[in-house]
Amino acid sequence: MMTPRPVLIINAHLVDPLTATETNGSLAVENGAIHAWGRTIDASAPPEGALVIDGRGRTLSPGLVDLRAFVGEPGAEHRETLSSASRAAAAGGVTTVVSMPETNPPVDDPAVVDYLVRRAREKAGIRLLPAAALTKGLNGKEMTEIGLLKEAGAVFFTDGARSIANAQVMRRALTYARDFGALIVHHLEDATLADGGVMNESELSSRLGLPGIPREAETIMLERDISLVRLTGGRYHAAMISCAASLDIIARAKAEGLPVTCGVSINNLTLNENDISTYRTFLKLSPPLRDEDDRRAMVEGVASGLIDVIVSDHNPQDVETKRQPFAECADGAIGLETLLSAALRLVHSDDVALPRLLQALSTRPANLIGLPQGRLLKGAPADLILFDPDEPFVLDPETLHSRCKNTPFDGARLQGRVHMTMVGGHIVHEA
C-alpha cells in the first residue's frame, strides 16, 4: 500500500479515551501516524500536499476495535466475506476486527492463520486479525498448538461460541497459554444447563412458551474458569457476560488480583428479553437477552470500568437459518455497522460518559491484544473516525454492507453516524 499523503483535520471535537480528554481543535496525520493534535496546531499552514478536512464540529476519536466478529472466510462466504465485513466495519467506525475461528476448515492450524493474514492484507480495507481455535476442530477435547498459532499471527485463542466442558482441557490450555503469554477467551455456557433453551429463563419465557436458559449456565462456567485461573495463573477473558451475578464474580476475581478481564455484547447492553415479545428471531442470541435488571447491571459495569470491552458479536445468518420458528432458528445477529450508534444510546441516556464508552470500544480491546491503536498519541497509527454522535436516522437493513441482514435494530431510531473512517492514514469510508 502506498504511503498516505499528510492529512490535517480541523474544527473537530477531539476525544482521547486513553486520557479521558475532550477538546476542540485539530489533528495532523503524517506517514500514516498521528503527528500532533489539540488546540495549538496552526491550521492556517498545513503541510505541503496535505489533505485538509473540515470536521465541522463533529467528534474525532480513535477507531473502534471489535474483538468478536464472525467472518465467513474460509468456507462460509455466503454469510460474510473479508471484503463485505471490512466494508461494514468501516461504515460503522470499526478499524480493527478480530475474526472468530469457526470457519471451514476451522482456524486450528498455522497454515489457516497464515492464509487469513494474507487474505486480509489483500482484501480488507481495515485491520482484520484472526483468533485461533483453542481446541482442535473446536471439539473441546485436544488443545491446539498455541505457540505455533501465535507465531503465525493469532491474536488470542477461543472456541468461539462453543464452551469447553472438560475442566482438565481448560486447565492445560491456561497453563500452556501462560507460558506463551497468550490470552484465552472463553464463551460462558454450560451446555447441559442450556440444553434446549432458546431465551432467558424467566416469567416471560414461560408466557411465550419458550424453553429458558438459566443464568446459572453462565455463572457456573465462569466460577469454574476463575478457579482454574487461580490454579494456573493464565490470562483469561470472559468473552461476554450477561447478568449481574457474573459481574459480581468478575469483581471478586479482579479484587483478588487475578489476570481476568471480561466483555459484553452490545446487544446485552442495549436490549432486553422484552424485545423478543413478538418472537423476533433476530433477537435469538447467545448469551440470551436477559431482563432489565441484568441489562442495567451491564451498563453500570461499563460505566464503572469493571467490564473491560464491548463487542459487536457480529454473527451473520442467512434467510434459511433465521426465517424459522424462534425455537428452531440459528443464534446470532449482525452488529459491526451498528456497534457505535447502538452504544451511543448509553451516552444519550447519560448512563456512560463518551470517553468511558470509547475506552471500552477502542483503548481497552487494543490493550488486551497488544495493539498501539485506541489512543490519540503522537506516533500512534492514524486509525481514526469522524462521527456526529447526535445525528438521527432510522436503520434500514437494506442499506447495510453485510451480506446478511439479521440486525436486531431493524427499523430502530438511532443516533450517531460515522462520516469518515481512516486506517493507517488512508480514508477507507466516507459518508
Image: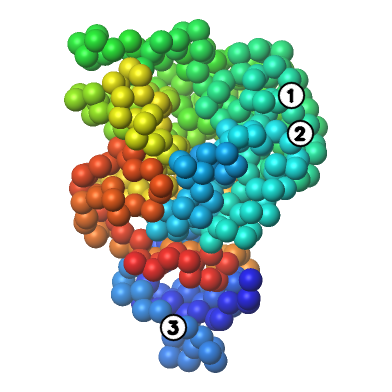
Q: Secondary structure at mark 2?
A: helix
At a point 35% along the width and 61% down the height, the residue shown is 418
Please tell me how crowded label 2 is: few (under 14), some (14-19), or many (20+) other residues with Cα within 10 Å. many
Question: Which disc number belongs to residue 332?
Answer: none
Q: Which one is nearer the viewer's eye here, 208 or 23?
A: 208
Mark 1: amino acid: Met
Residue ID for mark 3 = 52
Between discs 3 and 1, the one toward the N terminus:
3
- The reply to whether callout 1 and callout 2 are in contact (CB within 8 Å) is yes
- The reply to whether callout 3 and callout 2 are in contact (CB within 8 Å) is no
Q: Secondary structure at mark 1?
A: loop
Question: Which disc number belongs to residue 146?
Answer: 2
Mark 3: amino acid: Val
User: What whole-number distance in Å separates the C-alpha atoms at marks 3 and 2?
Assistant: 45 Å
Whether residue 238 is visible: no
At a point 60% along the width and 70% down the height, the residue shown is 33
Question: Which disc number belongs to residue 143?
Answer: 1
Mark 2: amino acid: Ile
User: What whole-number distance in Å separates the C-alpha atoms at marks 3 and 1?
Assistant: 51 Å
306 left or right of 34 in image? left
